[in-house]
Amino acid sequence: MKSIAIILSSISMLLLLTCGGDDNPTEPDDGYDLVGSETIGPDGGTFEVGKFTLTVPEGAFGADIELSLYVSDTDRPMGEYAVSKTYRIEGLPDEYSEPLHLRIKYDGTLEELSFIAFGEVKNLIGIEGLDYIYDLLEAADSSGYLVGDLPATASNPGFAKTSYSSSSAAGNVKKLILVSKYGRSSTGHFDIIHPFNQGDVIDSLVQMLESAYDTVEAMEFSYHNQQWPIVVPVIHCEKGHAAFSTSDDKPRIYVNSDSLEYSQISLVRSDVCSAFFMLVPYLYVDWTTVNEAEHIWLHVANSLWFAEIFSDSPDYIPPRFINYEMAPFLGMRAGATNVDRSVNHGFGMTSMIEYLTQNYHESVLKRIYDGIETGGHSPVEAVMQSIEEPVEVWWPDFFKEYLSGNLYNVAAETFMGEASGTFNIRGENDTLTTFTGSYPELSAKIYIVNLNYADIDTSAKLMFTVDGDSSTAMAFGWKDGALEYFAHAETLVVSNLRDLIDNGYDHIVVVPVYYHYHWPNYNSSRDIELKIRVTKQQPLPYIRGRVDLRFLIHYIRDDGYESCDSTYSKFWIADGTTSGNTFHGTLDTSWHGDYGIGSVTITVDPLTLSVTSFAADCVEARDGSYMSYSLEGVNIPMNSNESSLECMVEGAETCDHITSADYYYEVGETYFDLYSFECITSSYIRVQLWD
C-alpha cells in the first residue's frame, strides 16, 4: 500500500513526454567527457569543477556518495534556448533531505527569464526504453552565474516524491542545462513557463487548461486538495504532446514546445486535458493509502476518456486505446496484476468508461470516486455501486455494444483475431464441440463457429450452453466484416443456419460473459464450459409418457377442518403417439385400471430436449368414491436422454414450474378439496417419454 502520490507518479511515468529518445540514456552518451569526481558524505561538502559547482549541506546525504560530472558540447536537448553546455551528473542518491545548491556559469547574455533545466531519467511504463523529462528550476543571476536549488527528495509524509529509475552502475543520472529567453504566463490556476517567442500560442494553451479546469468543476469534483497554481513547463521533446507527472509534492503538466510551434493545437488539446484529469484522484479523493495496481487502471481509463470532450473529431478514439482493445476480456480487475499491466489495462478499459458515460451520464465518474473516498470501496466495487442496474444486466450489455462497434468503432477483425477457439462446420458429422476455459471475475472470451457447410439441413440450429453460474452466452453473426448482435442467454439457440449461410453470414461468434464479482480481490476465476451443438428437426418416436409429482397440499374437509398431507404424490402413465414435437396419450389401464380415465399431453423442444409444457388429468370412480386430479406445468429441463427422455425439477423451486394443480376427493358425504399447495426439499416433478 502506498500513498496517492505514488499512484499518480506511476501513472505519470506512462504519460510523460519522451524526450531525448535514447535507448539507454543512463549509459555514457557519445560526446560526453568525464571532467571530475568527488565523494561527499553526511557532513556535506562542495563538488566544484570548472564552471560547475554543487554544494551539499550537512545532513543532506545519509552516507558517503561518489559523484561524477560529465560535460558535452554536442548534446543540446534545449536547443537554441541553452546558454551553457549540457552537464551530466551521476551518483546522486534517490533521496536527500535538504536542497542542493547549484552554481553554473552561463555563456552569452541572459534574456527575459532564465532557469536551470533539470532532466531526470524516468521509467516510461508501456514505452520501451528510458528517457529524460526536464523541470525548469528557479534561478538567479549572480555575476555571470545562474544559481538555484535542486529540491530535497526525501519522502514527504503527505505526498511522496516521484520514483525514478536508472540502470547506471554509477547511480542516478541527471542532466543540467542553463536556459534563457523564457516567458511566464500566470493565471489563478496555472503558472506556464514557456519559450518567450511562443507567447502568441500560449493564450490557446491557457484556454485549454482553464477549459479542463472548468469541465472538471462542472462535473462537481472538488479541488479541496490542490494548492494553485499548477506549474506547466513548456519544453522541447522529440515526441508526445503533453503529460502529467509529480515532482516532490507538486504536480506538473508538461507541454511539448514543438507541438505548439508547429500549430498542432487540436492534437495538443486532447493530451493537455487528459493530463489535467490525471489530477482528479489527488485533487478529489483524500486518500492516505491505496493499492497501485488496483487503482491505476481506473485513473488511466478516466483520463483517456476525458480527452474526448476536447477533441475536434466526432469519432474520436484515444490513441493510447489502440492495441489494448482486448483489455475488458481479461477481467475488469484481473487484467491489472501489476503497475505495468495496470496502466496498459487502463488504456483498454477506456471502452468501459465510454459505455458508462454514454448510458449513465458522465456523473457516473463522480459517483465512482465518491464511492472510493466516502464509501471506502475499491475501484471495482465503486463502479458497481455507482450503477443502479445489476451487473448481470449492464456487463453483458457493455460487451454487446462493444463488439457491435458502438464504442470507439473497434473493427470486428480485432476481436476475431483474439478468439479462444474455433469450431468448423463442414459436414453432417460436425455436430458437437466443447470448450472449457478459466474466466476471471467480470471477463469474457470469444469463440468462432465457421459456417463452411452450404448444404446444411434447412432445419439445422446452433445451441450454445454455458455451464457455470453468473454467465451467459452472447451470439453475433459475422457478415461483410461486421458483427451483428443476435441474443444472449444461458442456453442460446441460433435458428435457420441455412438461411444465414445463404444470406452471406460466414461465422457465428459466441461470447461467454462471466459477470460474477466478489470482495475483496475481484480477480479470482472459475472454469466455465461452453458447449456448442448443431441439431436439426428429428421426428420424436415416443409412444409412452409418464408424469410424477410430489408436493404438500392444503385441503378443506366437509366439516371445515384444515389439514396438510406431507406425502401427497401422484403419477400418470399413458399410451399414445407423437405428432411433431407433442406426445398425446390416454391412461394405461394396466396401471390405472378400468376405473381411471384421463390423458397426458407433453410438448418437447426438439433442440434442447426439454419439456416446454405438459398437462395430465384423471378421474377415478369406484366403491362409492370419486376422485379427480390434474396438473399442468412448463419448462422442465432435460435430466437424462439414455433409455428414455427424462426431464425433472426438484426441491422448493418445483412450484415455479406448475401453472395449475387441482385435487378433489369425495367418499360418502365426506369430501376433501385442495385450496393450496407448496413445494419443499422433497418435492419434484418428473416427466418421461419412451418408445
Image (cartoon, grey):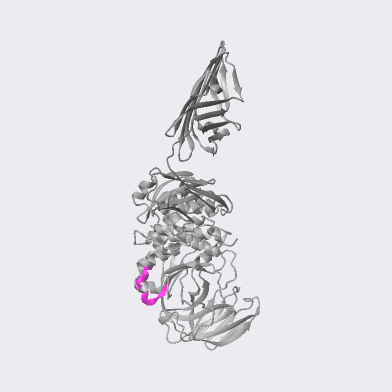
The one of 17 and 56 positioned closer to us in this rendering: 17
Compared with residue 540, is residue 411 higher up or lower down, i.e. above or below?
A: below
Q: Does residue 673 appear in this view?
A: yes
Image side of residue 151 versus residue 460, left or right: right
Q: Quadrant of the N terminus?
A: bottom right
Q: Residue at x 40, y 59 (%)?
A: 413
- In reply to whether residue 279 is colored magenta, the answer given is no
Magenta region, main secondary structure: helix
Q: Residue at x 45, y 58 (%)?
A: 350
Range of the magenta residues? Answer: 192-205
The one of 287 and 594 positioned closer to us in this rendering: 594
From the top left corner, tell me how far across and down residue 293 is, in percent: 55, 60
From the top left corner, tell me how far across and down residue 146 is, in percent: 49, 82
Compared with residue 426, is residue 243 higher up or lower down, i.e. above or below?
A: below
The one of 278 and 451 positioned closer to us in this rendering: 451
Query: How many numbered marks appear?
Result: 0
Q: Does residue 391 appear in this view?
A: no
- In reply to whether residue 194 is colored magenta, the answer given is yes
